[in-house]
Each structure stands twice: as C-alpha cells, then as structure tokens.
Image (spheres, rainbow, N blue to C red):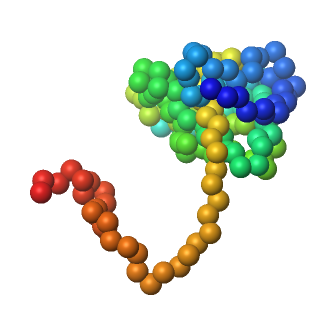
Amino acid sequence: MSALDVAIARLPHGADLALPAYQSAGAAGLDLVAALTEDVILDPGARALVPTGVAIALPDGYEAQVRPRSGLAARHGVTVLNAPGTIDADYRGEVKVLLINLGPAPFAIRRGLRIAQLVVAPVVHIDWREVPRLPASARDAGGFGSTDRPA
C-alpha cells in the first residue's frame, strides 16, 4: 500500500493528543480523537460539534471523509450526523466531527476518546455533457428498493 504525504498541524488545544492513526495494518480509516477541554454529555437525540485539535492540508485531487466508528454506533447509538462529512482539499480549518446520540442513554464524550474515522480518497472532477435522453440500462429508473422486488 502506498502512502500519501499529507501536512497536519496540531492546534494548541490538541497539542498533547495523539495524531489521527490507523488502528491496524489493513485499516482504511485513521481514528480521530476528541480535543475537548471538558467532557460533553450527549443526551439522546442531541448533537455536538466536537473538535479534534488538528487541521490538515490535503493535496489537490483528494478529499477526506469523516465517518462513524462502528463500535460507538453499535454499543451506544452514537454516530456522525452528516456521514460521511467531507473535508475538501482547500479547507485549512480544524477538523471537527458532528456527533449525534441516537441511543437511549446519555453518552459522555471525553478528551482523547476516539470519536470518528478519517478516510482519504481521490476525487474525480467531471464535465457535464447534457443530452436529451440517457442511455437505457437494465435497472433504468428503478430506485429505492427496486432491486428487492421479485421479478
């Protein structure tokens, strides 16, 4: 697997925290941690914008996607509200994670807690070619459950 050189800056409130890191050799996402100055209690149905204490400079032609951590979602119902959140190559502000608690109990977000994953991926820009009619396909205009219908 090849590595992409990406600049990262630790912000003052994240200086003592670990940089985003892969948790296994085959992991696609780097774990992001909460750079909170005090705990945040996320009540059921509530959301919070959680700082990570880092800013990144992606190369042109790449994006970063902020995705939920499966363990938080499965055990507590805590997930990323705008999943996946997109960080564009020209954004230089702090990476923040919009979390929501869809679970039945309050959830404590503590400093250093792994709260989300960051997946970096190439981006392809397109040029629209407007046509009067799209070419036919086997699925055609079927959507929202159309592939589950019996023939």
Instruction: Work out whether residue 105 can be spotted.
Output: no
Q: Is residue 1 visible?
A: yes
Query: Residue 75: x percent and y percent?
Result: 42, 20
- Please provide percent x and percent y for residue 117: 59, 29
The vertical placement of 98 against 23, above or below, is below
Q: Which residue lies furthest to the bottom in this view?
A: 132
What count of labels does the image hold?
A: 0
Residue at the extreme right: 12
128 shown above or below 100: below
Which residue is situated farthest in the front direction here?
Answer: 1
Q: Relative to 134, say whether 96 is above or below.
A: above
Left or right of 45, for residue 125: right
Tell me the residue at 24%/53% (across/down): 147
Relative image position of residue 69 (x, y in whole percent): 52, 27
The residue at the point 62 percent across, 41 percent down is 121
Name the residue nearer the viewer: 142 or 84.
142
Q: Residue furthest left?
A: 151
Q: Between 141 and 1, which is closer to the camera in this rendering? A: 1
Q: Which residue is drawn at 63% across and 32% down?
A: 118
Q: Determine which quarter of the picture holds residue 114.
A: top right
Q: In front: 145, or 17?
A: 145
Q: Position of residue 12 (x, y in %)?
A: 87, 25
Left or right of residue 86: residue 35: right
Residue under the point 82% across and 33% down: 7
Q: In which quarter of the image is residue 144?
A: bottom left
Q: Quadrant of the N terminus?
A: top right
